Amino acid sequence: QLQLVESGGGSVQAGGSLRLSCTVSGYYSNYCIVWSRQAPGKEREAIADIDGDGITTYADSVKGRFTLSKDNAKKILYLQMNSLKPEDTAMYYCKAAPSRGQCRRLPDGGFPYWGQGTQVTVSS
């Protein structure tokens, strides 16, 4: 059983940075964790994942600008977002799947644990 809580969202101007946090309660080393986002009227997009070995993958839309990392001692996953664009405006969620490998492309039904989300707004 995991609980995920996101924080760190806010409003920023284009070109700025934000760091989101996903705090995990429970034993999560056998889980793959994904950051996904959903903008109004758009489909949810899985943008980054990190597996139990710490290997990360990124969607093309954020590659080179966003970095996912984790602090196992604090049980926090960070999404560092740089060079933000207005199109990055969305609700950002972290979610966990019971998988040792990458899971970014799994359907939503494969993730039994979700956070409540944190809003990111980027103005031009």
Image (cartoon, rainbow, N blue to C red):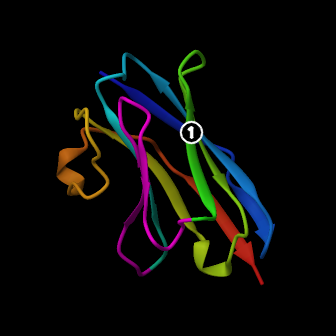
Q: Is residue 19 left or right of residue 106?
A: right
Q: Is residue 62 magenta?
A: yes
Q: What span is colored magenta in the figure?
A: 41-63
Q: Main secondary structure of the magenta part?
A: loop
Question: Residue at 78% across / 84% down in the picture?
Answer: 124
Q: Quadrant of residue 98?
A: top left
* Horizontal side, residue 73 vs residue 30: left or right: right
The part of the image, by quadrant, that contains residue 33 is top left
Residue 52, located in which quarter of the rendered image? top left
Q: Count every numbered label the image shows and give the total.
A: 1
Of residue 52 and residue 114, the one placed in the foreground of this image is: 52
* Element assignment for label 1: strand
Work out whether residue 19 or residue 82 is closer to the camera in this orientation and state it.
Answer: 82
Question: Residue 62 in the image: x percent, y percent?
Answer: 54, 67
Residue at position x 68%, y 69% from top? 121
In the rendering, at what x and y percent does residue 2 appear?
35, 25
Q: Is residue 75 left or right of residue 47?
A: right
Name the residue rendered at 40%, 79% in the picture: 42
Q: Indicate yes or no whether the magenta region holds residue 37.
A: no
**Looking at the picture, does residue 44 appear above or below residue 51?**
below
Quarter of the rendering occupied by the N terminus: top left
What is the three-letter code of the residue carrying label 1? Ser
Q: Can you give x and y, in whole percent of width and height, for residue 102 in the image?
A: 29, 45
Q: Position of residue 48 (x, y in %)?
A: 45, 54
Q: From what the image shows, is residue 87 above or below residue 91?
A: below
Disc 1 crowd, CA 10 A, few/some/many (<14, 14-19, 20+): some
Q: Which residue is mark 1?
A: 69
